[in-house]
Amino acid sequence: MALSALPLLSCARPPIRRELVAAGTRNVGVFERLPNGEFSGLGVELVRLLAQRHGYQARFEIYPWRRAMEVVGGGKADLLVAPYKTPERQRVLRYSEQPFFQDELAFYVRADAMPVWAGDYGLLKGRRIVVINGWNYGPAFTAAAPQLHISVTNTVENGLRMLSHTHVEMFASNRRDTEPVIVALGLQDKVLALAPLIDVQNAYFAYPLAPRYRELPAQYDRLLAAMMKSGELQKLARRYDVTPP
């Protein structure tokens, strides 16, 4: 009888791992594709950790920001890495309860032409301002935007070049993504962040309103809450030079 059981055991297969597709755009320290094709960053580490704990096979896709939101909102990926929360986005995305990092948003200006800002959008009327396509800059900026002279670009690099070449007077961006690019472009003495900040935004994971893995949002909420309580999230954030919430 023991011998007859051997063929059955030899045919046993390991359980199939469910694919977990995470989409995002290039986010310094959060969601980046390295030159060798591998993905790295705080968000990537958290996706991998959850996949390992719950039996998923993680796959990463990188897009321009608006496209990344569309892919997840349309259910073609399982989660979006690092969106800020807005009422408009909440109509098409379900957010995690716990944010996993925080960004400071600021106006960047040329060092030789610093407009008066002082947190008053009325002082910026007529100023040429460039923003990143699809980014959110907080409720105060959104409310003031119709009265501002705003143009759009798709990358931090383009925004800084437009500023340094005097095509615009101000560039609205987050400091985490922008400071390394300033160094890479050799603009340390030419552009700087203007005080006060535009806003401080928390960043989350988000999912389709009807996720194909219904348990996924709750799994992430439990993971992030436990890591925040234990200090693991803060430690991991420091490794990637990202500010924890």
Image (cartoon, grey):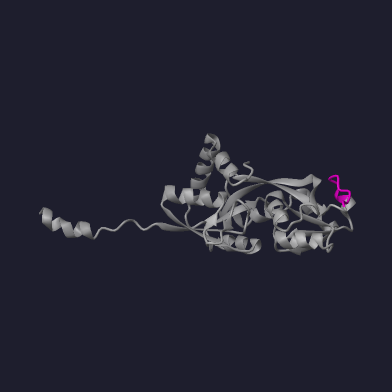
Q: Position of residue 118 (x, y in %)?
A: 86, 44
Image quarter of residue 1: bottom left
Residue 120 colored magenta? yes
Q: Is residue 241 left or right of residue 225?
A: right
Q: Residue at x 50, y 43 (%)?
A: 223
Image quarter of residue 69: bottom right
Task: Please provide the residue range marked out in magenta.
Answer: 114-122
- Which quarter of the rendered picture does the C terminus lie within? top right
Residue 20 colored magenta? no
Q: Residue at x 81, y 54 (%)?
A: 190
Q: Is residue 181 left or right of residue 124?
A: left
Image quarter of residue 80: bottom right
Q: Position of residue 193 (x, y in %)?
A: 78, 49
Q: Position of residue 28 (x, y in %)?
A: 63, 53
Q: Nearer the viewer, residue 240 or 244?
A: 240
Q: Nearer the viewer, residue 54 or 86?
A: 54
Q: Is residue 129 visible?
A: yes
Q: Nearer the viewer, residue 70 or 169?
A: 169
**Which residue reaches farthest top?**
230
Q: Is residue 210 visible?
A: no
Give the main secondary structure of the magenta stretch: loop
Against 63, residue 100 (above or below) is above
Q: Position of residue 210 (x, y in %)?
A: 53, 57
Q: Nearer the viewer, residue 10 or 29?
A: 29
Q: Residue at x 60, y 49 (%)?
A: 204
Q: Residue at x 87, y 53 (%)?
A: 112
